[in-house]
Protein backbone atom coordinates (compact mmCIF):
# COMPACT_ATOMS: atom_id res chain seq x y z
CA UNK A 1 0.00 0.00 0.00
CA UNK A 2 1.37 3.40 -0.98
CA UNK A 3 4.14 1.95 -3.19
CA UNK A 4 4.50 3.53 -6.62
CA UNK A 5 6.52 1.77 -9.32
CA UNK A 6 9.37 3.76 -10.81
CA UNK A 7 12.64 3.57 -12.71
CA UNK A 8 16.18 4.64 -11.84
CA UNK A 9 18.40 5.62 -14.76
CA UNK A 10 22.01 4.40 -14.86
CA UNK A 11 23.52 6.30 -17.82
CA UNK A 12 26.52 5.35 -19.92
CA UNK A 13 29.77 7.13 -19.00
CA UNK A 14 30.42 10.37 -20.84
CA UNK A 15 32.14 9.76 -24.14
CA UNK A 16 30.89 6.16 -24.49
CA UNK A 17 29.06 5.27 -27.69
CA UNK A 18 25.44 4.34 -26.93
CA UNK A 19 24.42 1.06 -28.55
CA UNK A 20 21.09 0.33 -26.83
CA UNK A 21 19.06 0.26 -23.63
CA UNK A 22 18.46 -2.44 -21.03
CA UNK A 23 15.68 -2.42 -18.43
CA UNK A 24 16.38 -4.56 -15.37
CA UNK A 25 14.15 -6.09 -12.68
CA UNK A 26 15.71 -7.49 -9.53
CA UNK A 27 15.20 -10.85 -7.89
CA UNK A 28 13.64 -11.42 -4.48
CA UNK A 29 10.97 -14.12 -4.81
CA UNK A 30 8.30 -11.41 -5.16
CA UNK A 31 8.91 -10.62 -1.48
CA UNK A 32 11.50 -7.87 -1.93
CA UNK A 33 13.61 -6.27 -4.67
CA UNK A 34 17.31 -7.09 -4.34
CA UNK A 35 18.48 -4.53 -6.88
CA UNK A 36 21.62 -3.50 -4.99
CA UNK A 37 22.99 -7.03 -5.23
CA UNK A 38 22.08 -7.84 -8.83
CA UNK A 39 20.68 -5.04 -11.02
CA UNK A 40 23.05 -2.22 -10.13
CA UNK A 41 26.32 -4.19 -10.51
CA UNK A 42 25.02 -5.50 -13.85
CA UNK A 43 23.96 -2.02 -14.96
CA UNK A 44 27.39 -0.68 -14.07
CA UNK A 45 29.03 -3.23 -16.37
CA UNK A 46 26.50 -2.77 -19.17
CA UNK A 47 26.84 1.01 -19.17
CA UNK A 48 30.58 0.65 -19.76
CA UNK A 49 29.63 -1.37 -22.85
CA UNK A 50 27.34 1.38 -24.14
CA UNK A 51 23.92 0.36 -22.81
CA UNK A 52 21.72 2.95 -21.14
CA UNK A 53 20.31 1.09 -18.12
CA UNK A 54 17.06 1.47 -16.22
CA UNK A 55 16.38 -0.34 -12.94
CA UNK A 56 12.64 -0.89 -12.53
CA UNK A 57 11.13 -0.79 -9.03
CA UNK A 58 8.15 -3.04 -9.68
CA UNK A 59 5.17 -4.27 -7.70
CA UNK A 60 5.85 -7.63 -6.09
CA UNK A 61 3.85 -10.07 -8.19
CA UNK A 62 4.50 -11.75 -11.51
CA UNK A 63 1.76 -10.01 -13.49
CA UNK A 64 2.06 -6.60 -11.85
CA UNK A 65 5.83 -6.75 -12.20
CA UNK A 66 5.33 -7.57 -15.88
CA UNK A 67 2.88 -4.69 -16.34
CA UNK A 68 5.27 -2.28 -14.58
CA UNK A 69 8.13 -3.40 -16.83
CA UNK A 70 5.93 -2.90 -19.91
CA UNK A 71 5.14 0.63 -18.75
CA UNK A 72 8.83 1.37 -18.23
CA UNK A 73 9.68 -0.06 -21.65
CA UNK A 74 7.07 2.19 -23.26
CA UNK A 75 8.57 5.20 -21.50
CA UNK A 76 12.08 4.44 -22.73
CA UNK A 77 10.82 3.79 -26.27
CA UNK A 78 8.85 7.06 -26.24
CA UNK A 79 12.06 8.90 -25.27
CA UNK A 80 14.56 6.86 -27.28
CA UNK A 81 16.02 9.95 -28.94
CA UNK A 82 16.40 11.74 -25.60
CA UNK A 83 18.45 8.77 -24.36
CA UNK A 84 20.58 8.76 -27.51
CA UNK A 85 19.56 5.28 -28.67
CA UNK A 86 20.47 4.33 -32.26
CA UNK A 87 16.81 3.47 -32.97
CA UNK A 88 13.60 2.87 -31.05
CA UNK A 89 13.88 -0.93 -31.21
CA UNK A 90 17.30 -1.03 -29.50
CA UNK A 91 15.69 -2.00 -26.18
CA UNK A 92 16.17 -5.20 -24.17
CA UNK A 93 14.78 -6.37 -20.85
CA UNK A 94 16.55 -8.41 -18.20
CA UNK A 95 15.60 -9.90 -14.86
CA UNK A 96 17.05 -11.95 -12.04
CA UNK A 97 15.03 -14.85 -10.60
CA UNK A 98 11.56 -13.42 -9.89
CA UNK A 99 12.41 -10.33 -11.93
CA UNK A 100 13.29 -12.58 -14.86
CA UNK A 101 9.99 -14.40 -14.51
CA UNK A 102 8.16 -11.05 -14.58
CA UNK A 103 10.17 -10.02 -17.66
CA UNK A 104 9.23 -13.25 -19.40
CA UNK A 105 5.59 -12.74 -18.49
CA UNK A 106 5.70 -9.26 -19.96
CA UNK A 107 6.89 -10.67 -23.27
CA UNK A 108 4.22 -13.37 -23.17
CA UNK A 109 1.22 -11.28 -22.15
CA UNK A 110 1.91 -7.55 -21.87
CA UNK A 111 4.15 -6.43 -24.73
CA UNK A 112 3.06 -4.53 -27.83
CA UNK A 113 0.18 -2.23 -26.92
CA UNK A 114 -1.67 -4.72 -24.72
CA UNK A 115 -3.58 -2.65 -22.17
CA UNK A 116 -3.26 -3.15 -18.39
CA UNK A 117 -7.05 -2.72 -18.39
CA UNK A 118 -7.20 -6.44 -19.22
CA UNK A 119 -5.79 -7.05 -15.72
CA UNK A 120 -7.57 -4.24 -13.91
CA UNK A 121 -10.83 -2.97 -15.39
CA UNK A 122 -10.47 0.23 -13.36
CA UNK A 123 -7.23 1.13 -15.17
CA UNK A 124 -7.48 4.33 -17.21
CA UNK A 125 -5.22 4.18 -20.30
CA UNK A 126 -3.19 7.22 -21.29
CA UNK A 127 -1.09 8.31 -24.26
CA UNK A 128 1.89 6.17 -23.22
CA UNK A 129 -0.22 3.00 -23.53
CA UNK A 130 -0.27 3.54 -27.27
CA UNK A 131 3.53 3.02 -27.41
CA UNK A 132 4.79 -0.52 -28.01
CA UNK A 133 6.38 -2.43 -25.11
CA UNK A 134 8.15 -4.87 -27.45
CA UNK A 135 11.74 -5.79 -26.59
CA UNK A 136 14.47 -6.99 -28.93
CA UNK A 137 16.03 -9.35 -26.37
CA UNK A 138 15.43 -10.82 -22.93
CA UNK A 139 18.12 -11.68 -20.39
CA UNK A 140 16.79 -14.29 -17.93
CA UNK A 141 19.30 -14.76 -15.12
CA UNK A 142 18.64 -17.97 -13.16
CA UNK A 143 15.12 -17.65 -14.43
CA UNK A 144 12.69 -18.97 -17.04
CA UNK A 145 9.22 -18.51 -18.52
CA UNK A 146 6.70 -19.67 -15.92
CA UNK A 147 6.25 -19.01 -12.20
CA UNK A 148 8.47 -19.30 -9.14
CA UNK A 149 10.30 -22.66 -9.21
CA UNK A 150 8.10 -23.97 -12.05
CA UNK A 151 9.14 -23.47 -15.67
CA UNK A 152 6.44 -23.42 -18.32
CA UNK A 153 6.30 -26.41 -20.67
CA UNK A 154 3.36 -25.03 -22.62
CA UNK A 155 4.87 -25.08 -26.10
CA UNK A 156 1.77 -23.55 -27.70
CA UNK A 157 1.82 -20.59 -25.30
CA UNK A 158 5.54 -19.99 -25.80
CA UNK A 159 5.18 -20.18 -29.58
CA UNK A 160 2.19 -17.82 -29.56
CA UNK A 161 4.17 -15.31 -27.49
CA UNK A 162 6.42 -14.38 -30.47
CA UNK A 163 9.31 -14.26 -28.02
CA UNK A 164 12.84 -13.02 -28.71
CA UNK A 165 15.26 -15.89 -29.49
CA UNK A 166 15.89 -17.75 -26.23
CA UNK A 167 18.09 -20.74 -25.44
CA UNK A 168 18.31 -22.52 -22.09
CA UNK A 169 20.98 -25.09 -21.17
CA UNK A 170 20.05 -27.16 -18.13
CA UNK A 171 21.40 -30.38 -16.67
CA UNK A 172 24.44 -32.06 -15.15
CA UNK A 173 27.78 -31.08 -16.68
CA UNK A 174 26.16 -28.68 -19.18
CA UNK A 175 28.64 -25.99 -18.11
CA UNK A 176 31.21 -27.91 -20.12
CA UNK A 177 29.21 -27.09 -23.25
CA UNK A 178 29.42 -23.31 -22.71
CA UNK A 179 32.18 -22.74 -25.25
CA UNK A 180 30.56 -24.93 -27.89
CA UNK A 181 27.22 -23.15 -27.45
CA UNK A 182 28.78 -19.70 -27.80
CA UNK A 183 30.54 -20.87 -30.96
CA UNK A 184 27.31 -22.43 -32.28
CA UNK A 185 25.51 -19.11 -32.07
CA UNK A 186 28.38 -17.09 -33.51
CA UNK A 187 29.38 -15.35 -30.28
CA UNK A 188 32.78 -13.82 -29.72
CA UNK A 189 32.26 -12.00 -26.40
CA UNK A 190 30.66 -13.38 -23.25
CA UNK A 191 29.30 -11.63 -20.16
CA UNK A 192 29.04 -14.12 -17.27
CA UNK A 193 26.35 -13.58 -14.62
CA UNK A 194 26.30 -15.42 -11.32
CA UNK A 195 24.97 -15.04 -7.82
CA UNK A 196 26.86 -15.62 -4.58
CA UNK A 197 30.15 -17.31 -3.72
CA UNK A 198 29.08 -20.92 -4.25
CA UNK A 199 29.82 -20.71 -7.98
CA UNK A 200 33.44 -19.99 -7.07
CA UNK A 201 33.74 -22.47 -4.18
CA UNK A 202 32.26 -25.33 -6.21
CA UNK A 203 34.60 -24.72 -9.13
CA UNK A 204 31.66 -24.14 -11.48
CA UNK A 205 32.88 -20.73 -12.61
CA UNK A 206 36.33 -22.12 -13.40
CA UNK A 207 34.76 -24.93 -15.45
CA UNK A 208 32.68 -22.44 -17.45
CA UNK A 209 35.74 -20.28 -18.09
CA UNK A 210 37.76 -23.34 -19.16
CA UNK A 211 35.05 -24.32 -21.63
CA UNK A 212 34.98 -20.81 -23.05
Image (spheres, helix red, strand yellow):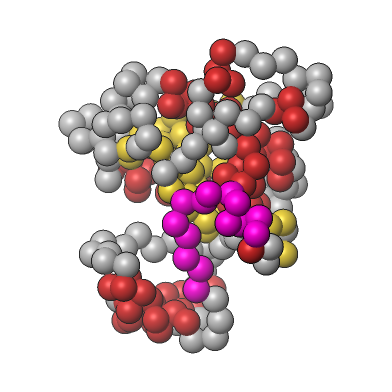
Magenta span covers which residues?
Answer: 156-169
- What is the chief secondary structure element of the magenta stretch? loop
Q: Is residue 105 above or below residue 58?
A: below
Assess whether residue 57 is covered by the magenta stretch.
no
- Quadrant in the picture for residue 51: top left
| Magenta span includes 167 | yes
Residue at point 30%, 30% (across, down): 87
Residue drawn at x 65%, y 42% is: 109
- The quadrant of the image that shows the C terminus is bottom left
Q: Is residue 150 or residue 6 the one in the foreground?
A: 150
Q: Is residue 25 visible?
A: yes
In this image, 131 relative to 84: left or right?
Answer: right
Who's the residue at 44% across and 79% down the image? 175
Number of labels in the image equals 0
Q: Residue at x 44, y 57 (%)?
A: 165
Q: Hey, which quadrant is residue 4 in on the image?
A: top right
The N terminus sits in image quarter: top right
- Pinpoint residue 77: horizontal percent, then vertical percent: 43, 26
Image x and y of residue 36, in percent = 54, 44
* x then y, percent, for residue 10: 40, 33
Q: Position of residue 30 (x, y in %)?
A: 72, 47
Amino acid sequence: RGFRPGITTVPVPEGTEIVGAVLLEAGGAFQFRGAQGDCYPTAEELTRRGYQCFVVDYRLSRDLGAIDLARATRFVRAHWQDYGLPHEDAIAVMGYSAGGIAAGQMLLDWDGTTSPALYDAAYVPDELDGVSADAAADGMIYSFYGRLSVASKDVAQLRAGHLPPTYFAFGRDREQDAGALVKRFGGSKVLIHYGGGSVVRSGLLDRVKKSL
